[in-house]
Amino acid sequence: MKKSQAMMLRENMNRKIKKIFTNPRIIILIICLVLAVVSISPNLNVKGVTIRNVVANSSASIAGIIGPTPNARPMNRERILAINNVVINNVEEYYGVVEKLEINQTVHVKTNRGLYKLLMRAETEEVVLNETIKRIVTEEVFDEATNKTENVTRIVEEPKKEVYVLGVEDIGLRVYNPPKTNIKQGLDLQGGVRVLLKPEEKVSKTYTDDLISSLNQRLNVYGLSDVVIRSSNDLSGNQYILIELAGANEEEVKELIAKQGKFEAKVGNNTVFRGGEDITYVCRSADCSGIDPGRGCGVAAGGGYVCRFRFSISLSPEAAERQASLTRDLEVIVENNDEYLSEKLYLYLDDKEVDQLNIGADLKGRAVTDIQISGTGGGATNQEAVYNALQNMKKLQTMLITGSLPVKLNIVKTDNVSPVLGEEFVNNALFMGLLILISVAVMVSLRYRKIQITVPMTVSLISEVVLLIGVASIIGWNIDLPAIAGIIIAIGTGVDHQIVIADETIGGRSVQIFDWKKRIKKAFFIITAAYLTTVVAMMPLIFAGAGLLKGFALTTIIGVSIGIFITRPAFANVVEILLRE
Amino acid sequence: MEDKKEWLFMKVYDKQYKKLLIIPFVLLFIALVLIFYKYSTTGEFIEKGISLKGGTTITIPMVKGVNIEELRASLLSSFPGRDINIRELSRIGQSSGIIIEADVDPEETDELSSFLEKVERELSIKKDDYSIEIIGSSLGESFFRETIVAISIAFLFMGIVVFIYFRSFVPSIAVILSAFSDIIETLAIVNLLEIKLSTAGIAAFLMLIGYSVDTDILLSTRVLKVTEGTVFEKIKGAMRTGLMMSGTTIVAILTALIFTQSEVIRQIMIILLIGLGIDLINTWIQNAGLLRLYVERKQKPYEEKSGNDVEGEYE
């Protein structure tokens, strides 16, 4: 007798389970869950280190390694698996191996896409000695009288210099521990720099696009490709440009993007050439750019050290012509046995003087296309001055290459998030999420004392989080702190709505219920109203305040929508199937 | 003993609901007076944090044994006239770092970098060890205006949805009034606690609209759309569900409050916690009382007729 009852119960259970997995709403939920998991594609066994950025002109970029595009999904990015057959498992191991590389060593970098052969270069510093050497120079000179270009050979005396090897040049790769899922972590979670810029005057859509592409180009020249640049507006019609550099904590980048970069070289009040179109080539290799071998470093007047950098550029013929006509009428003066022209060439960046250069007497009235640009950098120590001078040079070069921005930008907000803090946040958020889930599950169990309610409720909450993160990974948006707050609300609302469903259907009544449909309909009447009010309340936030809380509003809206359209119908059906006699 | 107490409360709740209605309205009045007082004395009706006012926030996790007073004095001596605040971060009762706030604008580049250098030296930390958030005062100001506009629009939209849903004036107004009281009273308490609001804190008020309306809608639906039982029975039934809803949310919030190490999340959670507490009064005394007044007044002429209907119909 007892046995048959147990058998009947089991049969009943089997029937119910079969019913659950053939229910269309539940099938939809399961399909969505599978899609979400595929998109997140968790893989705990990812090996190597992921490449974040490749520094321009470095050994790595010469060898053909390309940095990821910002839209590249985290799991699809190139990963370094081994260097010189030494397997790399994490960032520490990577730096351990890279540190030991030597000058002129050939390095084999194995990635998940291929094998690259890199040649390590030396980082050098030129020091000027107190001696001079003579050198024979042959130049092409355009003679205006004959209208021909002729070769002129002359002997120049220049200071003798010695090249010191400082060490191995940076390999040029920025790496991070490989992501284990396709969830894109926002800046708050992985560290990096966020800059919010505001154009000084209102600009049209085309200008904004120009701005964004110029900024992108500038950052690319810098070797930063994993960047997000987008424009946003707020409710009052203010325009903003938001730049996010994941993982980067490079101060100079901030300055670089905020500078309009209007470069001008003037003789007197007349412009000789401008950055951008007047300049056809900017030298960035070691033989024609770096610390000025002729002037080098010295003690500054106000204490500390100052170093002078120089690099050569090529002017367009028109600009060269302009220079010729502007210098034609200048007088030649003699200073320390050197012959100069009476006016200097002044270099301006964003209307601020960067440097002034003496113009050699031999340039008078000649249309020379190759000229040298110079500037300075200072610091408390010699080393610091060298570093700062080289940084200033890099910035100036970048602006000469990319030209000026159509409008001046002001930095209105910057965030530097420490990567250490970010990692803590992720672990903390996961831990917190788990605790919240457990505490809610405990409360629900205490209240309903029915496993048929507690289990579906917990499962449905977990599914909601998975679906929400799945959607985020499909559309490639970053999970940051505001988004986490959005997830928390969506889950909170989820619990509330499931309690409404549970109470409307079985709450306070006997289990024998005959009008399930009606009761579920009533539960949905309440939760639909709650859903609609949440959505309309979050809507204005999408457009308010430079879009910084957009992530929060969107996550909440998508989260509650997933709940009302996918998980809650499934939950209601499961509860009905399990509890209906 | 427990039973008796509960019984007493329910008895008062049932019989004296009109008198109980005074409580939420007095609270609302006090809150409005407090906010108005704050506005008339300080010119602001909230305590603005750095992200709404402009300035620099430096978060340094994992530094221990810092003498906050000494650090502040030392920073002030190098940067006189600045408004510098230092707070300790704590998680599960343990110190987990410090936050330094200063009124340095992003446009003052030189001042800013020397300030950061000084902090780095004082605490012997490196660039990667801390986070900085710098916001310009004009942006802070516009953020504040924008979020206030966003909250107003959100509130308006919510009201429209409620009206369309219930299609009767008094119950809709009761729901909207309850949400309004929640926001105003929470704001007054936040001011009393001298919490400096950040952008995220303002977003928390938006969340509050969503959460507080949930229980109100549940209550109104049960009272208006179900015909079985007396009004009080319907309110009691709705209360069982509503308290469970608030209970789970409050437990979740408390868990997050204890374990989070993010100031952003912490502020959101504190505001939600206060708001949900206040919402218990505004939903179950104010909204429920108003609904009962409305329904019983409407039912009076038919009192003899309406008995125990078989099953509730709803639209």
Image (cartoon, coloured by chain):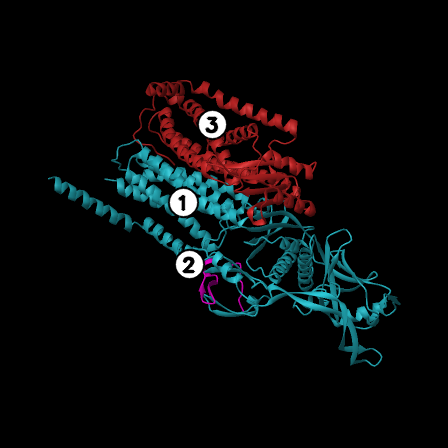
Range of residues picked out in magenta: A64-88
Q: Where is residue A393 in the image (x, y as percent from the top left)?
A: 69, 61
- Where does label 3 land, which residue? B282
Residue at x-position 79% and y-position 71%: A321
The local secondary structure at tag 3 comes to: helix
- Splitting the image into 4 quarters, where does residue A266 fall? bottom right
- Where does label 1 land, which residue? A563
As rendered, which of A150 and A488 lies closer to the eye?
Answer: A150
Residue situated furthest left in the rendering = A1
Residue at x-position 19% and y-position 45%: A10
Q: How many marks?
A: 3
Q: What residue type is labelled 1?
A: Gly
Task: Give the chain ID for the cyan colour.
Answer: A
The local secondary structure at tag 1 comes to: helix
Task: Give the chain ID for the red colour.
Answer: B
Q: Is residue A448 above or below residue A112?
A: above
- Where does label 2 land, which residue? A46
The local secondary structure at tag 2 comes to: loop
